[in-house]
Image (cartoon, rainbow, N blue to C red):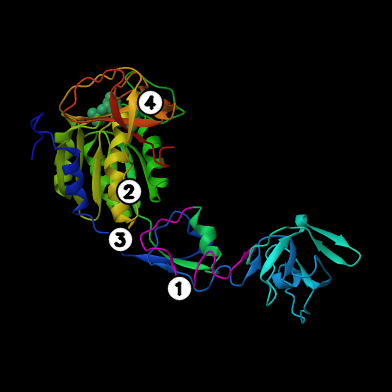
Amino acid sequence: MACCDAPGLMPIEEAMEKMLSRIKPIQSTLQLPLAEALGYVLAEDILSPIFVPPFDNSAMDGYAIRIADLQSTKTLPVAGKSFAGQPFTDQWPQGTCVRIMTGAKIPQGCDAVIMQENTQVTDSGVLFQQETIKPQENIRPTGDDIKQGDIVLPKGARLSPRDIPMIASLGVSHVNVVRKPKVAFFSTGDELKPLGQALEEGQIYDSNRYGIKPLIENFGCEPIDLGIIPDCPETLKQTFEKAQSLADVVVTSGGVSVGEADYTKDILEQLGEIGFWKLAIKPGKPFAFGELENAWFCGLPGNPVSAVLTMYVLVQPMLAKLAGHTEWTAPESIPAITKAGFKKAPGRTDYQRGIYSIENGQFVVESTGNQSSGAFRSMSLANCFVVLERERGRVEAGETVQIQLFNSTLY
Ligand code: AMP
Ligand code: MG
């Protein structure tokens, strides 16, 4: 279906649907030591084998008491001590207290821990100065954090720096995870020069590989950099063949815009089934997607903003599906008030680069300036995308727009 306002352009939602409906999650899994599992997607639920904490313990340094013992007196002699890792195991006589430290096991029969700041050590024992004592005060009960058998993380969650220590608290040393998707990428173009070399006439530096790689790596996938490939059919074909033998996904930049597409098309037709799409998105209109014999293919436009944007908006959701990362969600939209106007013509969904801030509790946003798809400074300056709906025209100052804060892969 073509987009109504701009004939021949495919709405981004339709492109996403077409891609995602074809991708099947990677089935191959591996067992990793917990310390090496950061960023991997869980291949199975994690169930807690124990209660955390495993025993009732003290939340404070102070004294373990039986509240009833303080009915007729304010002073109790100390019968012993319970330190972290060294529980009190003796008989506990009535009318006495036990010195206790944070994390130490609560002695049998204790129904409150009084923090030491509310006590005073005297010759006849500890004087309790606290007026009211709540039952179970300063006691962290068994299983307070996690119950035995709880599903603490579901299959399909990606392990974050916040998850790893929680799993460690269960004593789980190894986890089953999905193999990371491998993404081979290369830049195409006779004009591209590697960094560190002087530019000759008509040349520019290849910046796209530096934009694409972090979006693969930060997304929990394994990048395979195949360099710069000139616009030469033989070399291109060889590179595609190498790429698909190494990776689950082949990502290229350049060579999909009008003029160059025909030529890339010829090569890809021999290697698989590729659709060259015209998407109702700005920037990023020329985009190719398809299947090589052994890998998925995503052809990003060469303009640097377009390349990174399509990688972020279109390729990342696909990588999430491939990785079995079912907990992943696309960046959310937040309403914001514009501080100045935004140029916009109906027909395509714009992803303009914006700078948001919060003024009087309200999100406000302004443009980063030059919105050319070749001007990457607009990405560097931005802290959000300003997503302007397909049908929308020019936006004036004071109007409400939807912004998307960058996810952690762009931050
Ligand atoms: P193309 O999609 O190959 O027609 O390229 C569109 C524009 O993006 C042209 O101005 C190219 O010079 C530029 N371009 C293509 N590849 C890269 C790259 N890897 N780094 C920076 N600019 C590029
Ligand atoms: Mg090119």
Depth check, mark 4 against mark 2: the one in front is 4
Q: Is residue 208 above or below residue 60?
A: above
User: Which amino acid does the dot numbered 3 rest on?
Assistant: Ile
Residue 148 point in image, percent of width and height: 49, 73
Mark 4 close to ligand 1, CB under 8 Å: no
The answer to if 154 sits in the magenta stretch is yes
Q: Which residues are magenta?
A: 138-160
- The mark that comes first in sequence, 1 or 2, is 1
**Mark linked to residue 149:** 1
Question: Which residue lies under the disc numbered 3?
Answer: 26
Q: In the structure shown, which secondary structural element does the residue marked by tag 2 occupy?
A: loop
Contact, CB < 8 Å: mark 4 with mark 2?
A: no
Task: Point out the tag, 3 or 4, that comes first from the N-terminus.
Answer: 3
Farthest residue to the front: give it.
72
What amino acid is at disc 1?
Gly
Badge 1 crowding class, 10 Å Cα cut-off, few under 14, some 14 to 19, many 20 or more, is few
Cα distance between the residues tagged 2 and 3: 18 Å
